[in-house]
Image (cartoon, helix red, strand yellow):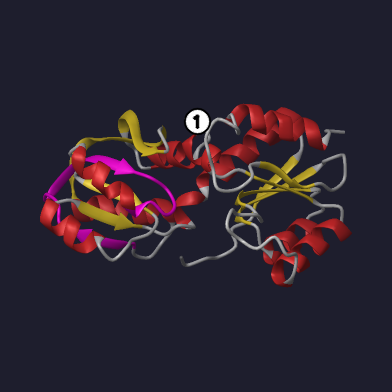
Amino acid sequence: MPDLHQIIAFADRLLDAGAIADYCPNGLQVEGLSTVTGLTCGVSACMPLFERALEDKSELILVHHGLFWDGESRVVRGSLKKRLKFLLDHGISLAGYHLPLDRHPEVGNNAQLFLKLGLVDRRDFGRYKGQTISCMGKLPEPLPFDAFLARVNRVLGVDQSFHLPFGPGLVRTVALCSGGAPDLVREAIAVGADVFLTGEVSEYVYHLAREEGIHYIGAGHHATERFGVMALGEKIAAEFGVRCQFVDIPNPI
């Protein structure tokens, strides 16, 4: 049967997990059973996801947002204590990949979002600590902004994304960065994008986007970061012959 540490080593190599400075550990976070027959994937580590993994007899959980973050208390109590106890009691391992999964050119959140939105002519975008974490591109043909917004909503499965319609009537150039990256709107403006798409919005963005003439879409942190962990889970399943399921635990943010 597939070995846990072989799976983690495969994911670490695929994502080049140590290549970018992050504010959380990447890779194995909790060690459970040494063999893996089932893999449960989700966006964020949480009890409902853990409970589904147990129901489906998965020995490994794979997430984008793990349990440990720089700046948080090292005291194991409250929800962290309950989560760790659940995983350890049931022998379930947890692995998380944050920025390495955002930036990967094939299975990454941004690469997958780029493909699903039908963009072409991919270029690097999104500088973070001296490295690129995202991408930008063009629509094959210009679209009215409302039509592109409808495509975003459909692809991400949301009713209506937050948006600031301050750009041109017809849009073609799209810069994107999944999750919480409102600061990258400045880079999107600098490179002449018609639209900047991310997951969240900050207060200052309103006046900046209006005065600079760019469309801003905040489609949801959770919604924009589902595709990467799906693709990574499928890659692992194909490589090791394990069962794989993606569980979408609802999160409106």
Q: Is residue 102 located in the magenta-colored stretch of the structure?
A: no
Q: Nearer the viewer, residue 242 or 79?
A: 79
Quadrant the N terminus occupies: top right
**Where is residue 8 drawn, in percent x and y?**
73, 35
Label 1: which secondary element? loop
- When asked about the image quadrant of residue 165, the answer is bottom left
Mark 1 burial class by Cα count in 10 Å: few <14, some 14-19, many 20+: some
What residue sits 38% from the left and 51% below the top?
181
**Where is residue 201 drawn, in percent x and y?**
33, 61
**Where is residue 240 drawn, in percent x and y?**
75, 31
What residue sits 18% from the left and 57% below the top?
208
- Seen in the picture, residue 208 relative to 138 is either above or below; the reply is below
State left or right for residue 196 relative to residue 28.
left
Q: Which residues are magenta?
A: 161-182
What residue sits 60% from the left and 54% below the top?
69
- When asked about the image quadrant of residue 230, the answer is top right
- Seen in the picture, residue 145 relative to 13 is either above or below; the reply is below
User: Could you tell me the amino acid type at mark 1?
Assistant: Glu
Q: Is residue 172 located in the magenta-colored stretch of the structure?
A: yes
- Seen in the picture, residue 98 relative to 241 is either above or below; the reply is below
Find disc 1 in the rendering and name its residue.
106
